[in-house]
Amino acid sequence: MMTRREALAVLGSMAVGTLGLPPIQGDATPPLAPGAPDSPERMALIEAFRTRSDGIADKFEARTHKSDWTMPYRLFRPNASGRLPLVVYLHGSGGLGTENVKQMGLGNIFGTRVWALPENQKAFPCYVVAPQTDRGWVRYGDPSPGDSVARVVPGLGDGARVAFELIDALAKEFPIDRQRIYLTGQSMGGAGAWHMLAQRPSVFAAAVICCGSRSLDDPAAAKTPLWNFHGAADDTVPVAVSRERIAALRKTGRHPLSTEYAGVGHNVWQWAYTEPSLVRWAFSKHRTV
C-alpha cells in the first residue's frame, strides 16, 4: 500500500519523469499510474493531489473578457520569461455561472490546478486560463415541442466563440506561443473541447478530454492529438459516447489515445488529471501548421 508521503513523492515526480517512465513516443499510450482505479495506491495519489494543490487556485487572477456578452475567467501567469504555452480549461455544468468562482471549485480543481503545480511549472511553465460560461460551450436552440430542455443545434456555440476570442486576446496581451496552445475540459466542458477542436482544428497543439457529453460535431473533424478519458461505469455520460468518437477518428487513420477506468463513474477527472504521464504527454505536442 502506498503511504501518503510516497503518494506525494509520486505526484512531485509527475513533471520531471523520475518514475522511470520511457520517453513519450508516437501514438503509444504512456504508462498509467500503478494500481486499479479503486486501489489504495491510486486513491492515495488522488488525495495527495488535493493536498499538494491546496492554495493554487488563489494564484489565478480574476478577470473578464468583454464581447457581445461578458465572459468571466481566471488566469494563472507563470513566473518565467519568453514565449510560453497556454492551457485552456473548460468547466463542466457544475461551473456554469457568472460569479467567476465555480469553474475553479468542486471537480474542477483537478483540471485547473494540475498545470499550475510548482513541479509542473518548473518543468513546463505555462499560462492557464479557466473561462466561465453561463450558456454552455456548444450552440443551443429552443426546446423541442413538449420539452423544456434546450436542444443542441449545429453551428459555433456562444461559449466556444467567446472562448476563441479570449484566446486571441490573451495571445496579444501576453507572450503566448501560438504553436503550443492546449485544450482540456470535462463533461459539458469535454463536449466543448470536442466542439472547439472540430470548429477550429488548427488552433490547438493537443487536447485532454474527460467524459465529454454529446455534441453534433463530426469527431473526425478533430485533427488535434488528443487523450480521451472516460469511466466505464459513467451513468451520466455513457462511455459509448467516447467510444463512438474515438472509433470515428481511428477510421480516418488517426491515432487518438483513449483510457477507460473500470468501475469509475462520471468523476473520471480525478484519475485522468493525476496520471503521472499526462502533463508530459501534453507538452510533448507542438502545432506545426
Image: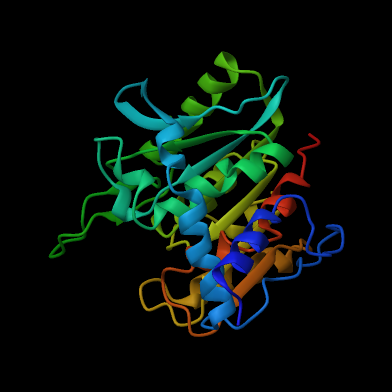
| Front in this rendered view, residue 278 or 231 | 278
From this viewpoint, which residue is outermost toward the top? 173
Which residue: 60% across, 54% down? 208
Image coordinates of residue 152 in percent, x first then y, are 34, 54
Image coordinates of residue 64 in percent, x first then y, are 35, 23
From this viewpoint, which residue is outermost toward the left? 146
Is 32 on the left-hand or right-hand side of 164? right
Query: Relative to 162, does residue 149 appear above or below in the rendering?
Result: below
| Front in this rendered view, residue 24 or 133 | 24
Query: Relative to 256, does residue 177 appear above or below in the rendering?
Result: above
The N terminus: image quadrant? bottom right
Query: Relative to 238, does residue 63 appear above or below in the rendering?
Result: above
Which residue: 78% across, 34% down? 289
Image coordinates of residue 19 in percent, x first then y, are 78, 64
Asked whether residue 195 is in view, the answer is: no
Asked whether residue 76 is in view, the answer is: yes
Residue 83, by quadrant, is: top right
Query: Relative to 284, does residue 77 appear above or below in the rendering?
Result: above
Is 146 on the left-hand or right-hand side of 63? left
| Front in this rendered view, residue 194 or 264 | 264
